[in-house]
Image (spheres, grey):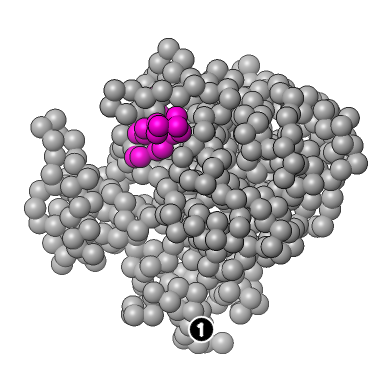
Amino acid sequence: MQKQLFPRDLSFRALLNRQKNAVPMRPAIRSGADARVLSYEQLNQAVLTQEALWRDSGKHCLGVLCNGTPECVLTIFGAVLAGLQVVLFDGNISEAELPELLQKTDVDCLWGAEELEEDMSPWLTGKAENGAGKLLFFTSGTTSFSKAVVLTEASLCASAWNGSALLPLSQEDTLLCVLPLNHVFGFVCGLLWGLACGACVALGRGPRYYAEDLKLFQPTAIPVVPLLLGFLLKQNALNEALRLVLIGAGDCPPALPAALQARGIRVSFGYGLTETSSGVALSLGADPYAMTVCPDDELTLAEDGEILIRCESCRMQGYYKDPDATEAILKDGVLHTGDLGHFDENGLLHVTGRKKEILVFPDGTKLYLPEYEAKLRTVLPDRDFAVIESKGAPALFLRGKESEREAVSAALEPVMRELPLARRLNAIYFDPAPLPRTATGKTQRWMLQKKVGNFT
Amino acid sequence: MTRQEIFDKVLEIVHDCVPETEEQELTESTVINTDTAIDSMGFTLIICRLEASFDVKIPDRQWQKLYTVGDVVSAIEKRLK
């Protein structure tokens, strides 16, 4: 891929204008659903049309149920350009979870939810203020456990520039966007990265077509989460033209990048948070776990090894209407990630673990354990339990006897049914002994993980 | 097609997509991810194969509501009628 230097865009309008002038006839967006291709000139024009529609709508905050179609992309860009606050939701979010999130984020109109709109109308009563240029992403997926992170078009463009500066695409590249746009990794690395470089962004058709989309679009670059990469490798779905795989959003077993490298495919790992508008460090060399810090970002380590990030251009504005949560993570302009790491002798970052009570799964989803456990406690009151990780999913460790399995499963069922599959418990471990705790009463999850290792 | 026939076909596809389940006794009340080795990507593959095999389409939004093997059988049965 040809190395290029890109100007820094401060808004979606600037990005789209730049490419409209630079490469008007080059393909910007390809749609798998209807085989449409939009050139950069057509993309710009279509976004302006959307902008005019939303400007006249009288609405202030648009909730978008992301379905990965060109219309979805145009709607997001158009609404932001028109000055609406835009909240991005999982396209398949359950009817049960949506109302709370709509209210929490002041949404007053919905896109992509025609069949739900009537049911949701009682909750579309938000009065967002000063929302212009803001996009709200949920920390991981859209569930009641997630926090709404306030990013801006400027921070997202800065993040795309940051990534492009280290890992540029050329105008000849096709970037396959298979990750959902409501995840910041999908939005920045699946969409803006390609557009910032003047490449063609191919919009994947969703989970049914993960493997087929690589055949259809013949991408040269693709951002993935580890679980999806494992799936594509297992299906032998990687196409010959593929030259670069960007892996992010979750822990990745070494066998996966090794399998790519064996095929001559360049592998890059990205480290970042929703709160930093996606990646702040990328691996560029042969070791995919050794990452170079992006140009706009300054990373240091706290005494206990916690990764601290200062990134004025890419940092979130805060959690939406949650100053306490914002203050807990953002102190004097420095983001306390809760992740642990170290720098090697070459100054490259290695992420080694997590300090916070969060589980990060191979599909890129995160689980905030205290909130998750609180939900389980509604059906398991007065029980001694903790949630841990087992085989890439949450598992319940419960003080009790194996003979209780049926009753416990039945009690959990109503809660589990409301959750996406990836967040449901995939195992229940019983142990008659009390759960190990520190002197302050905090569960020692590492000891439970060790016990589970002995069980299995 | 009877419910039992649908169940048998579902099992065949589940075993084919996730060979680790072959050693498990799956019933209609088996919870898909608590009692089996099926992760979300494996589940996606299973649904795609089921849709092709039965020539039905289960809307994406319904996928999240499938909790047990019996729920999967019911979703197919409903669309075959």
Q: Is residue A256 left or right of residue A339?
A: right
- Residue found 62% across the figure and 29% down from its top: A162
Front residue (pair A53, A357): A357
- Give coordinates of residue A443: x percent, y percent: 19, 40
Q: Amino acid at mark 1?
A: Lys
- Give coordinates of residue A388: x percent, y percent: 28, 49
Chain bearing mark 1 = B
Question: Is residue A347 one of those drawn in magenta?
Answer: yes
Front residue (pair A95, A204): A204
Farthest residue, direction top: A332
- Give coordinates of residue A172: x percent, y percent: 79, 47
Farthest residue, direction right: A25
Question: Is residue A440 one of those drawn in magenta?
Answer: no
Report helix, strand or loop for mark 1: helix
- Residue found 43% across the figure and 76% down from its top: B19
- Give coordinates of residue B72: x percent, y percent: 49, 71
Which residue is labeled 1 in the image? B9
Q: Quadrant of residue A34?
A: bottom right
**Residue A106 seen in this snapshot:** no
Q: Residues within 10 Å of mark 1 (few under 14, many from 20)?
A: some
Q: Main secondary structure of the magenta part?
A: strand
**Residue A329 seen in this snapshot:** yes
- Residue found 22% across the figure and 58% down from its top: A453
Front residue (pair A295, A25): A295
Q: Which residues are magenta?
A: A336-353
Q: Is residue A336 left or right of residue B64?
A: left
Q: Is residue A36 left or right of residue B23?
A: right
* Quadrant assignment for the N terminus of chain A: top right
